[in-house]
Amino acid sequence: MRKATRRDFVKGCMAAGLAFGLPRAAGSTGANSDVRLAIVGLGGIDVPGGVGGRGRQLIDAFSKVRGARVTALCDVDTAILDHGVQMMKKMGVEVTTCTDLRRVLDDKNVDAVVVATPNHWHALAAVWACQAGKDVYVEKPFAYNIWEGRQIVAAAQKYGRIVQVGTQSRSSAALRQAGEFIRSGELGKPRYAHAVIYRPRASIGRVAAPTPVPSTVDYDLWSGPAPIEPVRRKNLHYEWHWIWTYGNGEIGNNGPHSLDVCRWMLGVKEPPRHALSIGGRFLFDDDGQTPNVHIALLDCEPAPILCEIRGLPEDKKPAGSFRGVRTGVIIQCEGGYVRTDLTGAKAFDTQDREIKSF
């Protein structure tokens, strides 16, 4: 396979990848066979705390799923890729590796692709995988923006593929029961949902000049459908979350979990009729671009959704909590409210007395 070029990526982005017309995978599995997975994007090793990238968390998670087998790893950083290989060896598993995800798409021994790349790659990787006849698990956010998300849906429908997004709170039996309780009307009609994301963050600092790309990284592939820009941050990995070219800030990082729970609890089926969003980057003088304080109000049916983000400096500890929630959801109803984190929930009356636990 030839090396990717900028023209390939730009054309692919503009057409949502549809111009490449990759063939369907020939090596489909039978009903009783393992689903063979390729994990694309293993997470950065230059972040505080070391090597806990999302892709490598998924390696561990899928190793415990009966009927799933990781057979391939892909990352544009060979140092990270080597670390993933060592993880697999400790599990007694040999995998194929590559830095270009198109090699994964050509691999007939891969049935499904796990996309754990930076946000700007989600849509193109998912569309290409659908074209290649592979099912997809894509990490949140589903896509960088609404238009890109719609291209993934269109590709899944066109090529008859399964596409799942990593909003795993929907797998919680407790949250499912809480949603049924809310929709039963026992607390009266919902008045609003409040997504709370109070998560202290450290500054990413400021650099005086562009920083060199690590020698282990293919930066052309890392940039993919995004413009190639100088790296103006200390760490290439993870801190892309706070740069608009690649990330969406906290509302695209932890926001999808809480907002999805709000929509699920309320039974929201359609996009909001109107949206209001305000915010800014406060108390940091750094290279970050996205808001660390952010409020969004979504005019949804049957009730509005408020999303509140506080990502202020860690050393000042200003985040606090709202009704005991730092990262979670409050569903306010006429006769009380339900408070959730991402896996459990409790119901309270109008006097803040607990009446039910899920």
Image (tube, rainbow, N blue to C red):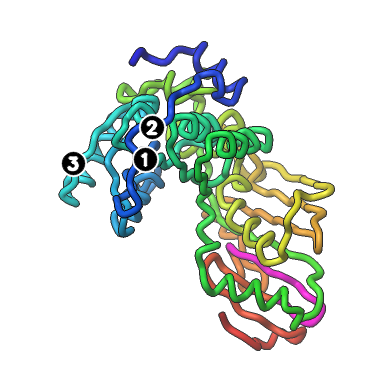
Disc 3: CA contacts within 10 A as few (<14), some (14-19) or many (>=20): some
Left or right of 111: which side holds 92?
left
Please name whichever residue, 49 or 333, is drawn nearer the observer in this view of the structure: 333
Q: State the residue at coordinates (75%, 49%).
A: 271
Quarter of the rendering containing residue 154: top right
Q: Is residue 335 magenta?
A: yes
Mark 3 or 2, nearer chain start: 2
Are the residues flagged by discs 2 and 1 in contact, CB closer than 8 Å? yes
* As drawn, 335 above or below 142: below
Q: Which residues are magenta?
A: 327-337
- Name the image quarter holding the N terminus: top left
Q: Amino acid at mark 1?
A: Asp
C-alpha gap between disc 3 and disc 1:
17 Å
C-alpha gap between disc 2 and disc 1:
8 Å
Disc 2: CA contacts within 10 A as few (<14), some (14-19) or many (>=20): many
Q: State the residue at coordinates (61%, 39%).
A: 153
Q: Main secondary structure of the magenta part?
A: strand
| Residue 334 pos. (x, y %) | 82, 78
Which type of secondary structure does the marked residue at label 2 adopt? Answer: loop
Q: Which mark, residue 94?
A: 3
Please name whichever residue, 102 or 279, is drawn nearer the observer in this view of the structure: 102
Residue 348 in sight in this render: yes
Label 2 sits on residue: 25
Which type of secondary structure does the marked residue at label 1 adopt? Answer: loop
Residue 235 in sight in this render: no
C-alpha gap between disc 3 and disc 2:
22 Å
Q: Which mark, residue 26?
A: none
Q: Amino acid at mark 3?
A: Glu
Mark 2 or 1, nearer chain start: 2
* As drawn, 207 above or below 337: above
| Residue 283 pos. (x, y %) | 63, 45
Label 1 sits on residue: 111
